Every structure is written in C-alpha cells, then in structure tokens.
Image: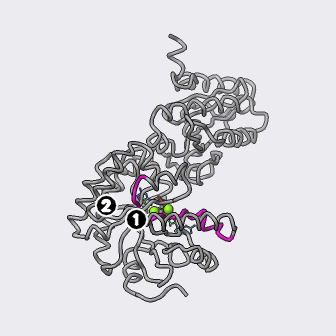
Amino acid sequence: MRHMALHDALTGLPNRALFRDRLGQAIAQTARTHTPFAVLMCDLDRFKAINDSLGHPAGDILLRVVADRMRAALRPYDTVARLGGDEFAIVLSHLDEPCFAASVADKLITAISKPIDLDGQTVEVGISVGFAVATERDVDPDELFKRADIALYEAKAAGRATFRMFCPNAGVRVATRSQLGLDMKDALRRGEFHLAYQPVIDAETGAVVSFEALMRWRHPIRGEIPPGEFIPLAEETGLIVSLGTWALREACREAMGWPDAVRVGVNVSAVQFRGGLEEAVLSALAETRLPANRLKLEVTESVLMRDADGVLACLHRLRALGVLVALDDFGTGYSSLSYLRRFPFDKIKIDRAFIRDIADPEAAAIVRAVVSIGERLGMGIVAEGVETVEQLELVRREGCAQVQGFLFSKPLPPEEARAYALSAGARVA
Ligand code: C2E
Ligand code: MG
Ligand code: MG
C-alpha cells in the first residue's frame, strides 16, 4: 500500500509525493554538506500527438521505455519521478561540479531519442530538459521547482530535444509553460492571434496559385511567438479546436479578397478531427461564401494514424464538396507512403528537409520518386522551403509543379499578401 501511494503505477517510478520528499532530503543534505544538487524537469516533445495518433496503449509502452532509459542514465542515488502525463522530474544529489547536471541532461536527451519499437512501429520521441542548480542558500522546494520549470520552458522554446539551465539574471522571463497555456485562453478573445500568408507559386509560369495561412501569436509581453511553440501546447490543452475554427473562418474571409483563381491552404491538426472539423469547415465556407474548391486543408499523416476510418470518411465528405486536401510535410513521418493509398490527396507537400538537401543526389532521387508517385496517383507536388535559385532549378528539374519558400516570399501580413496576389506576373525566371 505504501509503495503504491508513493509510486506511479505505470512506470514504477516515484510519484510527485515521493519526489517532494526526496527534494526535501536533498535540501537538508546540502545544508549539512554544502555540496550543491540539481533539480531537472523533463517533458517529452509532442507526446500528445504520438499518444493521439498511435493510441493510449502505445503511449503507455512509450512512457515505460522512457522511464527505463531515464533510470539507466542516472546514478542509483538520484531520484527520477513521473509527475504525471509526460512530465518527469529528477533530483541529482551531490554535484561535485554544477556542470555535471548539464552532462546528465545531455545524456538523457541522447538516451531518450533512440528509436523506440512499439509493436512493430518505430517511433522517435524527443525530450526537453530544464534544470536549476541549488546550493545551501536555496531552501524553498517550490522555488526550485519553478526555476527548473522556467528553464524547461526555455529549452522547449529553443527548439526541443535540448536543455537549458535556469539563469537568475534572465530578468522577467517568468513565463512558465503553464502560464503560457493560461495566456492562450484569453489570447483568442483578445485578438492576439493572426494569420500570415505565404504564396505558393506555379513552377513553370510563376503565377501565384495559392497562399498558405500560417498562424502567429502576438503575445503582449513575449512578442511574436512562432506556431511551432504554441500549436503543440494548444493541442495539449484542446484550445486548438477553437483556434483552428477561428483560423478557418479568418483564412476563408481573407481569400475572398484575392483573385478567383487563388486558393487558400489552412493547416489542420489531428485534434481538430475529434472536435468538429467538418462543421467548422462548412460554417467557415457558408459564412464567408468562399467556394469550397478555393479551400485546401493541409493535414499531416499524424491525422490518419488514429481513427483512420473516421478521419478518412470526414475527408471524403469534405472532398466531395469540392474542398482540396493536401498531405503536408511528406517524408518526415513514419510511413508516409502507405497513406497515399488510403486517400486521394490533391497535393503532396514535400517536406523542406528534402528541398534543403536537394543538391545531394540522394535527396534529389527521393524527390524524383515522390514526383513520379504523385503523377501516377494524380496528386500534384509542392516543394516546400525553396530558398535559393539553385534549389528552384533542381526542384523544377525533378518535376515539382509548385514551389513555396523564402526565395519567393516569407509569410506576409494580409494586406501585403493581397497586393502580392494582385500584382500578377512571372516570378520565376
Ligand atoms: P507547415 O505547414 O509545414 O508550414 C511551413 C513552414 O515552413 C512555415 O513555418 C513557413 O514559415 C516555413 N517556411 C516556408 N518557406 C520556408 C523557407 O524557405 N525556409 C524555411 N526555413 N522555412 C520556410 P511556420 O509559419 O513557423 O509554421 C510551422 C508549422 O506550424 C507549420 O508547418 C504547421 O505545421 C504549423 N501551423 C502553422 N499554422 C497553423 C495553423 O493555423 N494550424 C495548425 N494546426 N498548425 C499550424
Ligand atoms: Mg502546411
Ligand atoms: Mg509543411
């Protein structure tokens, strides 16, 4: 009974209560021995998306594997606890050198990022780590927790699968992740979200064929926050449903101001399919009077990994109305090819990782293969992230019909996008 009260049933790790106890012990010990210790907060990157797409049993196995790897990476007298969900916390006692905490964080990131086999599916998950080093002056466990959490937040913001140490001189950066989650709730009401529009260009004629709507958050204190940082959080909190509904309506409304031939692409997340995406699309079209065939939904394969039948049925119904569907970030997922057989996508967007490396003959061969698959299946190919004239030349040579990237334009504010759409003319030499 005692064991159960102090341990997490899934992973067997200490739970939050036992962790607090160990943290208290570390504080007491440091007061005696004057050797510092460290508190680490760890959070898996995009665990929610994996959990949603592969199902909870797979998510459970993944958490167990992560727990085992963490245990193996630590010394026997360190404590690693699962605080809940995909959040873990560690006490590293007796730090001879404070920099030892950084090397442990690094070791954890490397250990966790190794591929994990989940019933035949290989997945990779990253972990972000924030830590605070405590000396005998630091006696408040809550304060230490908070410092490690702030550092974790900064690690996440720095691009995931990385670590950060709490730095007391960081000034007013007290925004913890939970704070950001709370801020986000009000942000929608306060109109802090907006959309930027990036043109997609016909590789042959140079004409604008569409714009992709990309979400931005203008935070009153932190300034512009990129979607890579807040979309996963919005997915975790479920706010993505109302946020996505807003984006659909806003993008459709904006597209009404462009020439008739120009479509708008809107990214939709897997969570939205369980939150009434179909109704959101229908009402956005009805309210703005945008013809259905001017709207393109961009989905990633993660959308199809869970409840594929329900999602496919929904996509088929939308497509029957004329809405286009693109498969985004193609090539980055676990099994992109298999999804091509399951749904007649209108477009395949090749992930920019392949375009970045297209000078490399192997990357070029992959792009060429995707183009020919697309041709066979009647799906157009869009190359994402074209930044240089050389890349443009190469993607054209491989047969990509449409291109998008900084070479043509960054995502633009609405009025500039409108001007861009209206200033017709060849943009491709
Ligand atoms: P995505 O859908 O693949 O969007 C393309 C991303 O590539 C955008 O990043 C865009 O700014 C960036 N990009 C475009 N051209 C280039 C280039 O030449 N070089 C480089 N390095 N990058 C380029 P952004 O705006 O930061 O969006 C990131 C991701 O956030 C999007 O990836 C999409 O998955 C997600 N996202 C954005 N808006 C929304 C939204 O409204 N709803 C949902 N669910 N996700 C969104
Ligand atoms: Mg996209
Ligand atoms: Mg993409």
- Viewed as shown, does residue 176 lie left or right of 115? left
* In front of the other: 246 or 301: 301
Q: Give how far across and how far down residue 304 sits, in percent.
A: 42, 48
* In front of the other: 301 or 49: 301
Q: Is residue 355 a member of the stretch shown in magenta?
A: yes
Where are the magenta residues, as a range? 342-359
User: Does 35 sit above or below residue 328?
Assistant: above
- Viewed as shown, does residue 362 lie left or right of 160? right
Q: Secondary structure at mark 2?
A: helix
Q: Is mark 2 within 8 Å of ligand 2?
A: no
Image quadrant in which the C terminus is located: bottom right
The furthest residue to the right: 96
Res 185 visible: no
Badge 1 density bin: few <14, some 14–19, many ≥20, Cα 10 Å: some
State if disc 2 and disc 1 touch (CB < 8 Å): yes
Question: Distance from label 1 to label 2 (Cα)?
Answer: 9 Å
User: Does 412 sit above or below residue 35?
Assistant: below
Q: Give how far across and how far down residue 12 sits, in percent.
A: 57, 22
Any mark on residue 319, and which? 2
Q: Residue at the spot x=43%, y=44% of the render?
A: 236
Judging by the rendered image, the residue that carries numbered circle 1 is: 346
Q: Secondary structure at mark 1?
A: loop
Amino acid type of disc 1?
A: Asp
